[in-house]
Image (cartoon, grey):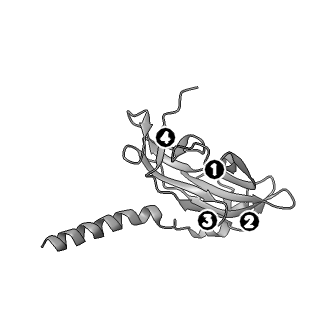
Amino acid sequence: MMGKISLAVLCLFGSLSVPATAEAIRSPVEQALVGQEWGGELPPLLAQCRHLTRFDLQRQQRPLPGLSAHVLLCQGSNLIVLTSLTATDGERVLDALRLPRLKRSERLIYPGDCELDGNSDTDFFAVVRFGPHERVDWKSGVRAAWMPDPESGKIEVLPTRHIVCWRPTPP
């Protein structure tokens, strides 16, 4: 009997950990964006979106030349678009990922506003609920995270276990 319970607990634990490491599923629109180029205007597939911000990517305080991440607001959801610079100073979409809708008390946190393994110089995005806490981690409010991977050209799901975010100070 004890062996069956142990096996059931292991299976449950395994099934709970799969989403944190599984590749994010792309919609047909996100897949259609890959390979699109834009110069100053957004590609036609993103015509209904509002461009919020752009980040030049870096790792360990060193810029990753030609790689950028854009955040757009499309029909109430955030969309992250990973791009590389083209020879004509345009940008080519390497990957695009629509993030889950934010719940009422959640915020999308941009690169540099959270720490990964104690470092704040790694570019990743996180969905965070601060609540009454000044410091939140995977137990108290970091719901999900994603990091652009320059080697694969993909936006990867990032396990939240080593992420810590601090409540931003008001301006």
Q: Is residue 88 above or below residue 121?
A: below
Please state which amino acid type lies under the numbered disc 1. Answer: Val
Classify 10 Å Cα crowding around label 3: few (below 14), some (14-19), many (20 and above): some
Query: Mark 4 and mark 2: span between their CA atoms?
Result: 33 Å
First-in-chain label (4 vs 2): 2
Could you tell me if the residues under marks 3 and 2 are in contact, i.e. CB atoms within 8 Å?
Answer: no
* Label 3 secondary element: helix
Please state which amino acid type lies under the numbered disc 4. Answer: Cys
Classify 10 Å Cα crowding around label 4: few (below 14), some (14-19), many (20 and above): many
Residue 131's quadrant in the figure? top left
User: Is residue 162 shown left or right of residue 78?
Assistant: left
Reading the image, the residue beneath label 4 is: 165
The residue at the point 58 percent across, 44 percent down is: 110
User: Is residue 147 shown left or right of residue 8?
Assistant: right
Please state which amino acid type lies under the numbered disc 2. Answer: Gln
Q: Is residue 135 above or below residue 26?
A: above
Question: Label for residue 30?
Answer: 3
Classify 10 Å Cα crowding around label 2: few (below 14), some (14-19), many (20 and above): some
> On the rendered image, what quadrant is the C terminus found in?
top right
First-in-chain label (3 vs 4): 3
User: Is residue 86 shown left or right of residue 160?
Assistant: right
Reading the image, the residue beneath label 1 is: 71
Question: Label for residue 81?
Answer: none
Farthest residue in the left direction?
Answer: 1
Question: Label for residue 36?
Answer: 2
In the image, 62 versus 132, the foreground residue is: 62
Could you tell me if the residues under marks 4 and 1 are in contact, i.e. CB atoms within 8 Å?
Answer: no
Between label 4 and label 2, give the one nearer the viewer.
4
The residue at the point 68 percent across, 62 percent down is: 45
* Label 4 secondary element: strand
Query: Mark 4 and mark 1: span between their CA atoms?
Result: 19 Å
First-in-chain label (1 vs 2): 2
